[in-house]
């Protein structure tokens, strides 16, 4: 049995993680920590857990005192809040999966530029592994510190990797146009995500300045073996959850849509959570699942390729991927606790 602790358990990603771990056959949740709801039963915060999970949320200090009781620590905190916790857990021999941004970027200068903070655990950056299982499975197995990818990067990187790995597109031509449901903004009170503000509307935000940009570029540069610089524009749409990423690139090879489907099907043939499909992806077909749907279109007139991907931002884009990483780290069935199809409608 894997003993787990969760810090930041009452945010949207944290709650989704609790939902998975609570029903995972190989996991026991040792503690749930929350700054905002310290001393309150988890079921009082989320009524769906009534009579099923009555654990009282504890504060971070109390959680730190219980670290020696667990095998793995999940951290779902805002950027800049994980440094000390990760150090303490690793010193005790505890595995860590950080759902935040603090260990995703390898260069502390880039971290400071985009997050406007000094990185306070630079010695741990070489030890951290970017937790995208489809690309880094073998090194995830050997790591004690996983930087769980962001939601937009997961959808974008999975969509674009085969094109860059096989040098099919011009790496300087990439444009990512992505839409997210409002849960991606978190559970904190925010005027922009109030029902009356975001319903019946769609808007772009953080144009040319979204913090997921360097994360996407970093991973795609590794895949491409040279620096990738791209344009990424996120949008907020009035739905609870889901991400749709439409990615564009200029073809540098004469390749048909059918040939690209062969390449993608071959590349992802052993991946349980990536579906290469002919239909244009929709978020409703992946909502509530750990699945990423990917479709391909070639515009022969402009010599461009369009890759469309869809994920549930709280699952494959956060908590589900964290559980997938945990399964790999503990050498158990990667699909365990995650083999769910979307619920419809």
Image (cartoon, helix red, strand yellow):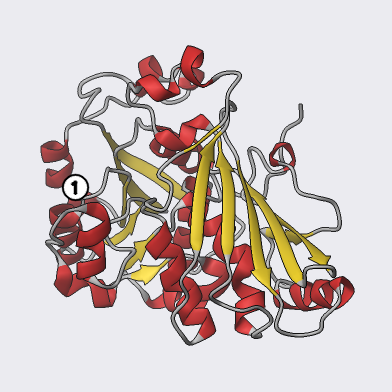
x and y percentages locating residue 301 in the rendered image: 84, 68
Q: Is residue 311 above or below residue 259?
A: above
SS for tag 1?
A: loop
Residue drawn at x 57%, y 31% is 237
Q: Is residue 209 left or right of residue 248?
A: left
Is residue 292 at least partly visible in the picture?
no
Residue drawn at x 50%, y 15% is 195
Image quarter of residue 299? bottom right
Image quarter of residue 199? top right
Q: Name the residue tied to disc 1.
A: 81
Q: Is residue 251 left or right of residue 127?
A: right
Q: Is residue 326 above or below residue 185?
A: below
x and y percentages locating residue 143 in the rendered image: 35, 73
Residue nearest the observer in this picture, 66 or 176:
176
x and y percentages locating residue 149 in the rendered image: 44, 58
Q: Residue furthest front?
A: 301
Q: Quadrant of the C terminus?
A: top right
Is residue 227 at least partly visible in the picture?
yes
Number of on-image labels: 1
Residue drawn at x 51%, y 21% is 198
Q: Is residue 341 left or right of residue 241?
A: right
Residue nearest the observer in this picture, 281 or 12:
281
Crowd class of label 1 (few under 14; some 14 to 19; many from 20; radius 10 Å): some
x and y percentages locating residue 114 in the rendered image: 27, 57
Residue nearest the observer in this picture, 221 or 252:
252
Residue drawn at x 27%, y 52% is 70
């Amino acid at each position: 049995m894997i003993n787990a602790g969760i810090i930041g358990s009452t945010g949207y990603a944290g709650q989704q993680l609790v939902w998975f771990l609570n029903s995972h056959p190989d996991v026991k949740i040792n503690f749930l920590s929350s700054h905002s709801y310290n001393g309150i039963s988890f079921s009082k915060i989320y009524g769906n857990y009534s009579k099923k999970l009555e654990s009282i949320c504890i504060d971070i200090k109390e959680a730190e005192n219980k670290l020696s009781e667990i095998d793995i620590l999940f951290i779902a905190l805002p950027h800049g809040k994980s440094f000390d916790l990760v150090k303490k857990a690793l010193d005790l021999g505890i595995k860590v999966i950080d759902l935040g941004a603090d260990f995703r970027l390898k260069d502390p200068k880039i971290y400071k530029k985009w997050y406007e903070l000094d990185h306070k655990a630079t010695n741990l950056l070489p030890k951290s592994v970017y937790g995208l299982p489809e690309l880094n499975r073998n090194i995830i197995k050997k790591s004690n510190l996983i930087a769980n990818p962001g939601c937009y990067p997961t959808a974008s990187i999975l969509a674009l990797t085969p094109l860059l790995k096989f040098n099919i597109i011009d790496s300087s031509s990439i444009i990512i146009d992505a839409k997210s449901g409002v849960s991606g903004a978190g559970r904190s009170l925010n005027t922009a995500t109030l029902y009356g503000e975001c319903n019946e509307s769609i808007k772009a935000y953080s144009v040319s300045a979204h913090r997921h940009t360097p994360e996407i570029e970093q991973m795609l540069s590794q895949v491409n073996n040279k620096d990738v610089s791209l344009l990424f524009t996120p949008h907020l749409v009035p739905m609870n959850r889901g991400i749709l990423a439409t990615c564009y690139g200029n073809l540098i090879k004469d390749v048909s849509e059918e040939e690209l489907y062969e390449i993608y099907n071959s590349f992802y043939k052993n991946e349980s959570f990536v579906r290469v499909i002919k239909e244009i992806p929709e978020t409703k077909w992946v909502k509530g699942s750990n699945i990423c749907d990917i479709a391909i279109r070639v515009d022969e007139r402009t010599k461009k390729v369009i890759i469309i991907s869809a994920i549930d931002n709280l699952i494959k884009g956060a908590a589900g991927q964290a559980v997938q990483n945990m399964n790999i780290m503990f050498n158990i069935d990667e699909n365990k606790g995650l083999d769910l199809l979307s619920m419809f409608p």
